[in-house]
Image: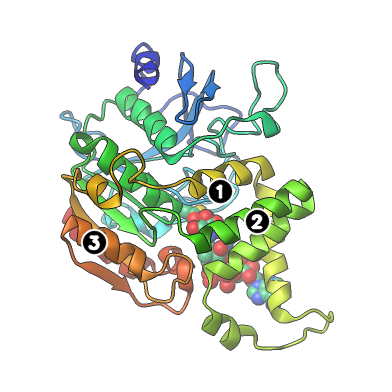
């Protein structure tokens, strides 16, 4: 991966501002890597572009930067309204801003769309060298590849060491990978509602979702989202909200709710990215080639805050407990009826934990 670092060395983007690609209402910035990215599983990606956003100002010593890592269908837009390049409003909107847990009066907050994604960073919907979209030809990427591309962005921004890397769910995987692969570049970490390695349960649901997309990318993505969304919420919440109610249109209320979320995802997300990113999650194991999870986590030098959601059935608390134990820190439990999505919804509780890490 030194190729990526070499590639960006000659193309340092400005620290604030930058060119905008057909994005009048947006503030996305773009970094183009000059050289190919050599991938962990053997593929090669030429012409990688990274879309990112920043809030606040980088201190002259570069020590006040915080990297926020988004989840599966998220993007760089942590805060702010929806707009071109931002199909949804900021997904952790209240966590970022002046005086907020990620206090932009003090910190330079960065979030990049993940490698393999579809909101500006190179992914299956991007053009391959032949000018056509990569589609199914897009090579397999890993969480390690995603983090190495983010390291190239850090280099280009002038961030040698993050004050913190924070994220939940799939974002939490990149948090751990950063702290293990590049421990001298991570001073603090916030690991939320995630795991150190994929579980059989996650593999089961993710491969089933992939099968739906592969069978028919259009309707399949919607079915995948319905399956996934069930795993993001708790059975109790669904029972209390919807029960067995049948709507006037004849649909079960819970089915209508899932269809609504499916339709919204189909309108904003690329089926190819969905497969590529869930495959990166399928192969996630921070202990790979490192002697196992505990041996890998022993490399971490960052100050760590580890948290989970008590009703999360997809990333149950045992997964965060394992990480907390390996790092020698307490596990913080966010109490929520919303299941895995509690990591997005319980912004006050999550924000308090971020404040604890950053002293904001
Ligand atoms: C880092 C990242 O993860 S970024 C990605 C995060 N964003 C997403 O995942 C987008 C998808 N949205 C979600 O998953 C959730 O809405 C969250 C987690 C963001 C927020 O959760 P909540 O506030 O609990 O919203 P909830 O799940 O109840 O959904 C509300 C929607 O369901 C709709 N809804 C509720 N009941 C029904 C029903 N019976 N039939 C149809 N639609 C229904 C509401 O009208 C509302 O629609 P809208 O969002 O278009 O306004
Ligand atoms: N709602 C989240 C759940 C996955 O963590 C997403 O779509 O990214």
Residue 347 numbered tag: none
Q: x, y (%) of residue 167?
A: 36, 52
Q: How many marks?
A: 3
Q: x, y (%) of residue 146?
A: 43, 36
Q: Is residue 210 above or below residue 185?
A: below
Helix, strand or loop under label 1: helix
Task: Name the foreground residue: 265 vs 87.
Answer: 265
Quarter of the rendering containing residue 249: bottom right
Label 2 near ligand 2 (CB < 8 Å):
no
User: CB under 8 Å between callouts 1 and 2?
Assistant: yes
Q: Is residue 137 visible?
A: yes
Quarter of the rendering containing residue 12: top left
Colouring style? rainbow
* Residue under numbered circle 3: 324
Residue at 48% over, 29% down? 50
Task: Name the foreground residue: 14 vs 183.
Answer: 183
Left or right of residue 313: residue 157: left
Residue 209 numbered tag: 2
Helix, strand or loop under label 3: helix
Residue at 40% over, 69% down? 316
Residue 278 numbered tag: 1
Q: Quadrant of the C terminus?
A: bottom left
Task: Name the foreground residue: 148 vs 17.
Answer: 148
């Amino acid at each position: 991966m030194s190729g990526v670092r070499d590639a960006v060395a000659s193309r340092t983007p400005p620290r604030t501002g930058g060119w905008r690609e057909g994005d009048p209402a947006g503030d996305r910035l773009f970094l183009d890597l000059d050289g190919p990215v050599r991938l962990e599983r053997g593929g090669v990606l030429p012409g990688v572009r990274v879309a990112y956003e920043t809030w606040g100002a980088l201190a002259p010593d570069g020590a006040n930067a915080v990297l926020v890592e988004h989840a599966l269908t998220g993007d760089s837009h942590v805060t702010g309204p929806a707009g071109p390049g931002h199909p949804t409003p900021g997904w952790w909107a209240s966590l970022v801003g002046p005086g907020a847990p990620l206090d932009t009066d003090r910190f330079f907050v960065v979030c990049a769309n993940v490698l393999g994604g579809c909101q500006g960073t190179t992914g299956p919907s991007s053009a391959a060298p032949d000018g056509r979209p990569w589609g199914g030809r897009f090579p397999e990427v890993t969480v390690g590849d995603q983090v190495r591309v983010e390291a190239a962005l850090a280099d280009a921004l002038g961030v040698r060491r993050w004050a913190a890397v924070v994220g939940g769910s799939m974002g939490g995987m990149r948090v751990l990978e950063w702290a293990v692969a590049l421990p001298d570049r991570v001073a603090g970490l916030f690991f939320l509602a995630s795991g150190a390695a994929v579980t059989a349960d996650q593999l089961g649901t993710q491969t089933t979702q992939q099968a739906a997309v592969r069978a028919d990318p259009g309707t399949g993505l919607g079915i995948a989202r319905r399956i996934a969304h069930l795993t993001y919420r708790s059975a109790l919440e669904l029972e209390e909200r919807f029960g067995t109610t049948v709507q006037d249109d004849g649909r079960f209320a819970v089915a209508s709710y899932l269809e609504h979320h499916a339709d919204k995802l189909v309108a904003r997300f690329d089926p190819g990215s969905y497969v590529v990113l869930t495959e990166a999650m399928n192969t996630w194991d921070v202990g790979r080639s490192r002697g196992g999870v505990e041996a890998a986590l022993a490399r971490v030098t960052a100050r760590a805050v580890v948290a989970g959601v008590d009703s999360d059935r997809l990333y149950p608390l045992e997964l965060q407990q394992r990480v907390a134990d390996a790092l020698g820190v307490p596990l913080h439990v966010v109490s929520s009826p919303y299941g895995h999505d509690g990591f997005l919804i319980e912004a006050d509780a999550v924000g308090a934990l971020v404040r604890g890490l950053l002293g904001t």
